Amino acid sequence: MRSPSLGLLLVLTAIWVAGLSHAAKNEDKASLRTAFADHFLVGVALNTAQIDGRSPKEAEIAAMQFSSLTPENDLKWQSLQPWPGRYDFKRADAYADFAEKHRMKLIGHTLVWHSQTPAWVFQGEDGKPATRELLLKRMRDHIQMVVGRYKGRIHGWDVVNEALADGGPETLRDSPWKRIIGDDFIDQAFRFAKEADPKAELYYNDYGLEDPRKRARCIAMLRGLIERGVPIDGVGTQSHFQLSQPPLAEVEETIKQISALGLKVMVTELDVDVLPSRGAAGIADINRREQADPALNPYADGLPEEIQGKLASRYAELFQVYLKYPKSVTRVTLWGLHDGQSWLNHFPIRGRSNYPLLIDRSLKPKPAFFAVLKDASSEKR
Ligand code: XIL
């Protein structure tokens, strides 16, 4: 574990401040995107206000620090096709423009998922569930329209998100996609995406892949995809982590096992929850809720230095693992630009103060930011 000295932190802070004024010219040397340029893309999830001009300072920091961009919500089905056949591409187009302007690789998140997908998608005539044929047609139409529109502009797609079950015995989650189409909905989604943009990278994305049992189910599923010739390029491990869970050894094992299949590995939604939990902290299912309790919101007035240090060490150690696999790990994306934006202020309990990212609520880099930068510079190649 490396803890950066105070002197080093001061120097790095000065570089950050100086860098901000040069951001427009992208000359900054203390940026994550520059520091990791020889290793992997470093990405960030952004929301609409950060790319449409309402939060210019946040946009500036994002463009300076990150080489990849994932829309946090605006490429999900409910945003793009809220009503049958009525598409809305206004916000999505703005991301594509922003990414091009700042030379960031744009990631499409996500095509086929059980959440943030309108109910009509799964409904047929007379309130009955859609038939397999109807749902497959809707899936294909949506994918052709969306992937086709951004052909050549979106670097890679999370084609299927969170299809795996959290517990056994079934491999796949009981979702409307699986119930109506059958287990082959995953194959179909990848084939439709390939058809729509043969050059885009296609990913399977999920959380909890560091849990040995879920990982085993994931690897079995991936083997099946590969055997059947399904066009998959990589796997996104979301990486919604806690301070001490999952263990680093499991993080590493997941990278090893996925890359042994010849697939790329992406860390797609990294954040480190610092708040206590009474539930199953590793389950990032957005429908999971925990009972609110002031004891579960201990840092409403600020993050104690001790925890700040633990967070920095955790990030340092995680990036040290990622840096060990430069051939397999092609991108590491943070799920949000700064702590104030993080979904973890509202999940699994609404209205808490969480501190899971590298930049704080006032847009200042945290010790974790410098710890990660230091990893990049101490890496001997
Ligand atoms: C989250 C967003 O961050 C929130 O703003 C939204 O309210 C719910 O979805 N796994 C995923 C992401 O794949 O799409 C989720 O994003 C977080 C969990």
Image: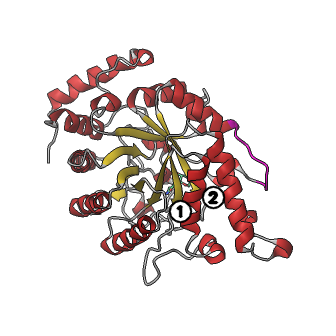
Q: Residues within 10 Å of mark 1 (few under 14, many from 20)?
A: few
Q: Residue at x 44, y 74 (%)?
A: 166
Taking 117 as reference, is 200 left or right? left
Mark 1: secondary structure = loop
Queried whether the magenta region covers residue 257, the answer comes back as: no
Q: Are marks 1 and 2 in contact (CB under 8 Å)?
A: yes
Q: CA distance from mark 1 to mark 2?
A: 10 Å
Where's residue 238, x and y in %?
A: 41, 56
The tag on residue 311 is: none
The tag on residue 286 is: 1
Q: Nearer the viewer, residue 47 or 76?
A: 76
Is disc 1's CB within 8 Å of ligand 1?
A: yes
**Residue 178 visible from this viewpoint:** yes
The quadrant in which residue 364 appears is: top left
Where's residue 370, x and y in %?
A: 25, 35
Q: Residue at x 32, y 32 (%)?
A: 32
Q: Nearer the viewer, residue 135 or 355?
A: 135
**Residue 244 visible from this viewpoint:** no
Mark 2: secondary structure = loop
Is disc 2's CB within 8 Å of ligand 1?
A: yes
Q: Which residue is mark 2?
A: 116
Q: Nearer the viewer, mark 1 or mark 2?
A: 2
Q: Nearer the viewer, residue 288 or 254?
A: 254
Q: Residue at x 61, y 48 (%)?
A: 196
The quadrant in which residue 152 appears is: top right
Circle 2: residue type: Gln
Please tell me whether residue 54 is drawn above or below residue 366 in the rendered image: above
Which quadrant is home to the C terminus? Answer: top left
Taking 31 as reference, is 371 left or right? left
